[in-house]
Image: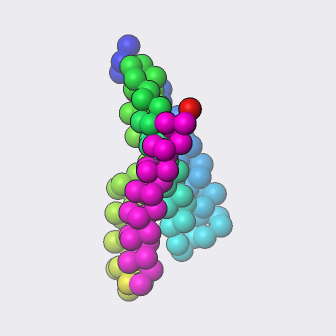
Amino acid sequence: MEIMWVALGAGFGAVCRYEITVLGKRVSPVLPYATLLINVVGALLAGFLTGMQVQGSLALLLLTGVCGGFTTFSTFSTDTFVLIRNKRYLVAGLYWCGTVILGIAAVVLGLWLGTLV
């Protein structure tokens, strides 16, 4: 049963990520704004759920499943590499630093908000 909760959440998270990515590529086909947004929102949600101390099946569904299926380190890494390959060094650096800094800040904010619930 535990695997079903993870699979259900991961499928939902991946579909949400896909839809946001498609929309993001329409808005900005060159810059990876969608991946940045996805990872920061995912970090906020993970922090919030952790702050709420979600456990058991709900944690498997939401934290492991949804957040795991939604966020994407591999796309973040690939986007950074593509920007570097295309000699967009400043944009690559800003994207990399921005993702890391905003992601950590989002987790901290999420943790705090989760403790208020």
Question: Taking 81 as reference, is 40 above or below it?
Answer: above
Q: Residue at x 45, y 43 (%)?
A: 111
- Asked if residue 66 can be seen in this view, the reply is no
Q: Is residue 44 magenta?
A: no
Q: Residue 16 occupies which quadrant of the picture? A: top right
Q: Residue at x 59, y 52 (%)?
A: 20
Residue 92 horizontal/vertical position (percent): 40, 77
- Residue 68 vs residue 21, the one in the foreground: 68
- Quadrant where the N terminus is found in the figure: top left
Report the residue that reaches farthest toward the front.
116
- Asked if residue 64 can be seen in this view, the reply is yes
Residue 93 horizontal/vertical position (percent): 38, 78
Q: Residue at x 65, y 67 (%)?
A: 27
Question: Taking 50 as reference, is 44 above or below it?
Answer: below
How many numbered badges does the structure rendering display?
0
Residue 97 horizontal/vertical position (percent): 39, 71
Range of residues picked out in magenta: 90-116
- Quadrant where the C terminus is found in the figure: top right
Q: Residue 51 occupies which quadrant of the picture? A: top left
Question: Taking 103 as reference, is 51 above or below it?
Answer: above
